[in-house]
Structure formats: C-alpha cells, structure tokens
Amino acid sequence: MDVAHSQVSISGTVSDYFSKKPLDAVTVQTTSGHYVISDSLGRYFINVQKDDSIWFSYLNKRTMKYSVDAIARPQNFEIALYVDV
C-alpha cells in the first residue's frame, strides 16, 4: 500500500458556538497519535490517514471522534465548540 495515497489533509476553523469567535489553542488529535494546535484565528491543518478519526480538545474537554472517511469536506471542516464562561 502506498502511504502517500492513504493520507488526507483536513483543515478548517474552530470557533465558539455562541459568540462565533475563533478559538486558538484548541488541540486537534488523531487516533494515530498526531496532533496540531489551532492558531489565533482558529485555523488548523493536519495530515491524517484515511482510516483515522479526529477529535478536538479545549480546556480539558473533548469532542466526539469524527471518522476521516465520513468527513464530506476535509478542506473546510468547521467546528463550533461549547465553551463555558
């Protein structure tokens, strides 16, 4: 199997569900152990395997896992998190 062809790039922004403001310092993790941190504009970019799942973690709270092969628009995977004030 050619590893280069089994990778997918996922990118998008993470925002606060209520205020719609971008969230920085959100950890985007994969089941294969890779992770990135969202920037000051809430943007992230991560390379993953097609059989991976990703999830988002902010202030020690995790989202559900999203299967990479079920993400319809990997170049624009937007997510809004509920953030406690």
Image: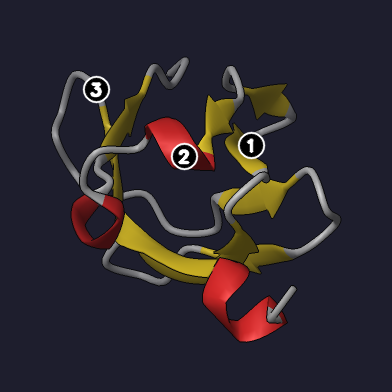
Q: Callout 2: 10 Å neighbours few (<14), some, many (20+)?
A: few
Question: How are the residues colored?
Answer: secondary structure
Front in this rendered view, residue 61 or 45: 45
Tell me if 21 is positioned left or right of 54 in this view. left
Q: Secondary structure at mark 1?
A: strand
Q: Which residue is mark 2?
A: 69
Q: Callout 1: 10 Å neighbours few (<14), some, many (20+)?
A: some
Kindly identify the residue that appears in the image at 43 percent across and 58 percent down.
24
Kindly identify the residue that appears in the image at 54 percent across and 50 percent down.
26
Tell which circle, 3 or 1, labels the residue nearer the N-terminal end.
3
From this view, report whether residue 30 is shown above or below residue 69: below
Q: Marks 1 and 3: in contact by CB < 8 Å?
A: no
Instruction: Look at label 1 and name its amino acid.
Output: Ser
Instruction: Look at label 3 and name its amino acid.
Output: Tyr
Distance between the Cα atoms at labels 1 and 2?
A: 20 Å
From this view, report whether residue 49 is shown above or below residue 3: above
Q: Secondary structure at mark 3?
A: loop
Q: Which residue is mark 1?
A: 57
Kindly identify the residue that appears in the image at 74 percent across and 73 percent down.
1
Tell which circle, 3 or 2, labels the residue nearer the N-terminal end.
3
Residue 67: where, in percent of width, then height?
54, 31
In the picture, residue 82 is in which quadrant?
top left
Q: Which residue is mark 3?
A: 17
